[in-house]
Image (cartoon, rainbow, N blue to C red):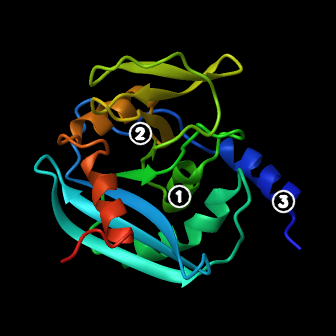
Amino acid sequence: MIDTKALRQEQIEKSRQVIRHDVFSASFTPKFIAGADVGFEKSGTVTCAAIAVLQYPSLELVEYQIARIDTLLPYIPGLLSFREYPALMAAWQKLRLRPDLVMVDGQGIAHPRRFGVASHFGLLADIPTIGVAKSRLCGEHIPVGEAQGSRQPLMEHGEQIGVVLRSKKRCNPLYISLGHKICLDSAVFWVEQCMKGYKLPEPTRWADGISSRKVVF
């Protein structure tokens, strides 16, 4: 029996540990930026996490690692990070290169209890993380302009929890939120710095391709 009430309480408690400001200096330039993505195989019984490490500013792939583990938790709305983080941490432990920043396919603080997978992973790995989600989990925003780069704040209960960014024309917007050890403005800045004409920034685009086997090496 899964104690969902205890897991939700854990999210609330751990969300208080999330650092919402930059831990790096204003002149910070990362050497490596990683993207992380999680998928499920064999009817959801296997969790597959991929982490792709890109050199910055070339955005060339320099390392990737994949971890497949038995799925430990069924899908429960709002508790997805508990289902995903074990595989993410397994892939993280395999990395030879340590990135300075990780973009995670999923929510950061744009979560009902301000503790999505990007925040959960960032806290456990003790690394600056950004949530780069393809859909909205919570919050409200006014329509985003059609021009590339258009954005609107994502708000909930008077608090800005993210930015809705039109990263490419004629594509649905991305939902950017801070994960851990970074502020929202910096999170959006680094996502934009990693765009190369696709909807997704290069780090999560590579991670998504690797985890879904769209990329063949």
Residue 81, located in which quarter of the rendered image?
Answer: bottom right
For the residue labelled by badge 2, is the local secondary structure a helix, a strand or a loop? loop
Q: Which mark is residue 121?
A: 1
Residue 147, placed above or below residue 40: above
Residue type at tag 2: Val
Which of the marked residues, 1 or 2, is nearer the chain's N terminus?
2
Q: Is residue 217 left or right of residue 173?
A: left
Q: Is residue 185 left or right of residue 97?
A: right
x, y percent for residue 53: 26, 62
x, y percent for residue 4: 84, 59
Which of the marked residues, 3 or 2, is nearer the chain's N terminus?
3
Disc 3: CA contacts within 10 A as few (<14), some (14-19) or many (>=20): few
Residue 17 visible in the current orientation = yes
**Residue at x 59% of width, y 37% of height:** 110
Which marked residue is nearer to the observer: mark 3 or mark 2? Answer: 3
**Residue designated by label 2:** 23
Which of the marked residues, 3 or 1, is nearer the chain's N terminus?
3
In the foreground, 81 or 174: 174
**Residue at x 39% of width, y 21% of height:** 151
**Residue at x 41% of width, y 39% of height:** 23
Residue 196, placed above or below residue 50: above
For the residue labelled by badge 3, is the local secondary structure a helix, a strand or a loop? helix
Q: Are marks 3 and 2 in contact (CB under 8 Å)?
A: no
**Residue designated by label 3:** 4
x, y percent for residue 212: 38, 69
| Label 3, label 1: how far apart the Cα atoms are | 19 Å
| Label 3, label 2: how far apart the Cα atoms are | 32 Å
**Residue at x 64% of width, y 46% of height:** 115
Q: Is residue 45 left or right of residue 143?
A: right
| Label 1, label 2: how far apart the Cα atoms are | 16 Å
Which marked residue is nearer to the observer: mark 1 or mark 2? Answer: 1
